[in-house]
Image: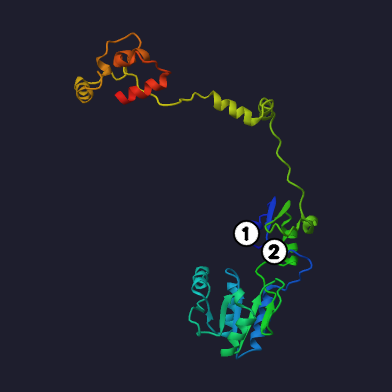
Amino acid sequence: MLKEPALTLGKQIHTLYLDNTNCNPDLVLPSRQEAAHQIVQLIQKHPQHNVKIGLYSLGKESLLEQLALEFRTWVVLSPQRLELVQLLGLADVFTVEEKAGRIQAVDHMEICHSTMLHWNQTHPTIAILPTSRKIHSSHPDIHIIPYSDHSSYSELRAFVAALKPCQVVPIVSQRPCGDYFKDSLSPRLSIPLIPDSVQQYMSSFSRKPNFLWLLERRLKRPRTQGVVFESPEENADQSQADRNSKKAKKGKLSPWPGDLKKQPCHHPLQIKKQLFPDLCSKEWHGAVSFCRVFCQKL
């Protein structure tokens, strides 16, 4: 990764997000090349055995490719993992046919004492768990090899020392590792100064908390509540044909507002008296009740 063009420009890196899965000085791991060589040697010692490789749902596909090319055999996969390796553009050494090759990738949970007994009843079989985790082997033919796609502690130390970021953020929060890289960090980048004009503008609002200031602005905005009815005066320019058509439909209920005698100001209560003379004797409480009756009559 240190040879990547983006990392060879000499730019200062402020924050490095680090895969700290194996960030433990007590966990000594070989390189992937060394661990893969151990697996090859183990398979070579069992030339007549089938080989089960216990894997998680993702990862170590390159190891399977290497073993297939080394032993010139197909590697049997599940249909789901076959789709994955095809997306990765690896060599055409994978198949879903059960007995096409002696190496088969299985889910790591299948590697247990009972399945080893079952497999060995039909054909001599060994199982390999390539992982850096501390796992107890429940069967003599289950072999745990410290192969990991995650960088070892020594590799992490070398990488951080080469980049010299200002800070390291681990992506595995349960395993803090900040103290391991203190001697490899660069000083924090200086924060740009805020111009005087910006400081003065910011200080002008310092007397009010931000949320109160925003709330005050929101309350000052004009808001329309309820239903807005169009004024009959705005519709006075409708054609006489339209008004006659509507009067024919609603003639039994009330006269159309366009036929009302024009007033200097069409106050809702004045319109109500002309539209509903039979209701004027009743007591009305507020404009909301009038609006509902007015809407129903129209």
Instruction: Tell me the tag on residue 206.
Output: none
Q: Which amino acid, by three-letter code, is at mark 1?
A: Pro
Residue at image mark 2? 21
User: Quick one: 49 or 45, which is closer to the camera?
Assistant: 49
Earlier residue among tags 1 and 2 = 1
The answer to whether mark 1 and mark 2 are in CB contact below 8 A is: no
At label 2, the amino acid type is Thr
Q: Is residue 56 visible?
A: yes
**Residue 247 percent location from the top left of the image:** 21, 22
- Which image quadrant for residue 128? bottom right
Counting other residues with Cα less than 10 Å from the Cα at mark 1, is it few (<14), some (14-19), or many (20 or more)?
A: few
Which element carries disc 1, helix, strand or loop?
A: helix
Image height of 223 relative to 126, above or below: above
> Residue most toward the front?
282
Instruction: Residue at the far bottom: name it.
Output: 48
Q: Residue at x 48, y 81 (%)?
A: 97
The relative height of residue 257 versus residue 150 in the rendered view (above or below) is above
**Res. 5 mark:** 1
Mark 2 lies on a secondary structure that is loop
